[in-house]
Amino acid sequence: MKRRSSIPIPVGSIVIGGDHPIAIQSMCTVPISNTSACIAQIHQLNQCGADLVRVALPDRESLEFLPEVLERTDPIPLIADVHYDYKIAIEAIHQGIPKIRLNPGNIKNAERIRDIAFEAKRMGVSIRVGANSGSLPEDLAHLLKAEALAEAAMREVRILEEAGFDQIIVAVKASDIQQTLEATRSVASQCSYPLHIGLTEAGTLFSSLIKSSALIGSLLQEGIGDTIRYSITGDPIYEVRAAKILLGSLGLKKGPIVIACPTCGRTDAPVEEWAEQIEAFLGFCDVSITIAVMGCAVNGIGEGKEADLGIAGTKHGGVIFRKGKVVAAYPKDQLWNRFFVLLQEVIRERA
Ligand code: SF4
């Protein structure tokens, strides 16, 4: 697929857009006032694969915790999520945040937006214009939702540009897939800024995984999208894992792929448990390898022959195979240890 051409925008230690890898985002669910836990969650998300982490600054009091969070999470790029109060954005910029997210629906005064742009430019900070379908400006209510979303974002982009600011990333999100697709395509055709893509309020794990993958996968296949976020009601680690799996599966990011059979009446192994343990083990791995987890040796070895390393169940344990060739069969009490030794060997070989 040919990627849409976009302007590279630095955000702290990384760059979004241009030819840079598609960045994975997530958002801290711990309030910044719970500083140590917030810092721990940012590190955890980053170690699992989040390239950037957004942190809510709900009020001016929350600013007193930001310097410590910035210092103790350096160099992980953080994004300050600011609504309504432009002074919070300006103070966060002064404290050293590398990126601000503004919602056109709730900081509406163009003069205030220009004030933020002026300070952001002076301090080398980027701004994400993030329009959401739930908080659109009232004067756009007569438009179709996708048109209103795109126009809300582009109108704020124009205000920033008129203020001489161009370090912009744009997002337009609804919880509806079709509206978000249309709005994102519209913005993609109107500007060259990098696009942050995803749904908003996508729901709990199962619901969001399906809806977000449909949306993000479709746009990425069209070459649209420079940074992605799965919005999931639940532990944000799942957002990062989902994003890694999607990007890896589309060949857009290095990383492991675990394939597992659906199981059937031939199954001789706890495939789901094995696959989950292997996925958890590979959570921090950024080496491109494919691992097959199969329920039986009868069909599993052939079905998993593309895998760099595979494991298939047998009546008394299992077999380990590489590229469809059996390495050895092991009884239950030796199988798992032997598999993990080989897994580490394969990772070292491919690193
Ligand atoms: Fe069934 Fe074996 Fe195929 Fe798994 S690999 S679905 S256990 S036949």
Image (cartoon, rainbow, N blue to C red):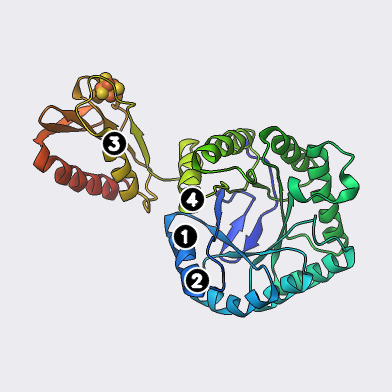
Residue 227 percent across, percent down from the top left: 60, 49
Q: Secondary structure at mark 4?
A: helix
Give the CA distance from mark 4 to mark 1.
9 Å
Q: Is mark 2 within 8 Å of ligand 1?
A: no
Which residue was labeled with disc 3?
Answer: 308
Quadrant for the N terminus, please. Answer: top right
* Three-letter code for the amino acid on which mark 4 is drawn: Val
4 or 1: tag closer to the N-terminus: 1
* Three-letter code for the amino acid on which mark 2 is drawn: Thr
Tell me the tag on residue 337: none
Residue 273 percent across, percent down from the top left: 28, 39
- Corner quadrant of residue 12: bottom right
Which residue was labeled with disc 2?
Answer: 73
Q: Residue at x 49, y 50 (%)?
A: 240
Viewed as shown, does residue 61 lie left or right of 116?
left
Tell me the tag on residue 240: 4
* Three-letter code for the amino acid on which mark 3 is drawn: Asp
Q: Secondary structure at mark 1?
A: helix
2 or 3: tag closer to the N-terminus: 2
Q: Are marks 2 and 3 in contact (CB under 8 Å)?
A: no
* Three-letter code for the amino acid on which mark 1 is drawn: Asn
Viewed as shown, does residue 256 lie left or right of 348?
right
3 or 4: tag closer to the N-terminus: 4
Q: Are marks 1 and 2 in contact (CB under 8 Å)?
A: yes
Q: Nearer the viewer, residue 119 or 147?
A: 147
Tell me the quadrant of ligand 1.
Answer: top left
Viewed as shown, does residue 232 lie left or right of 94?
left
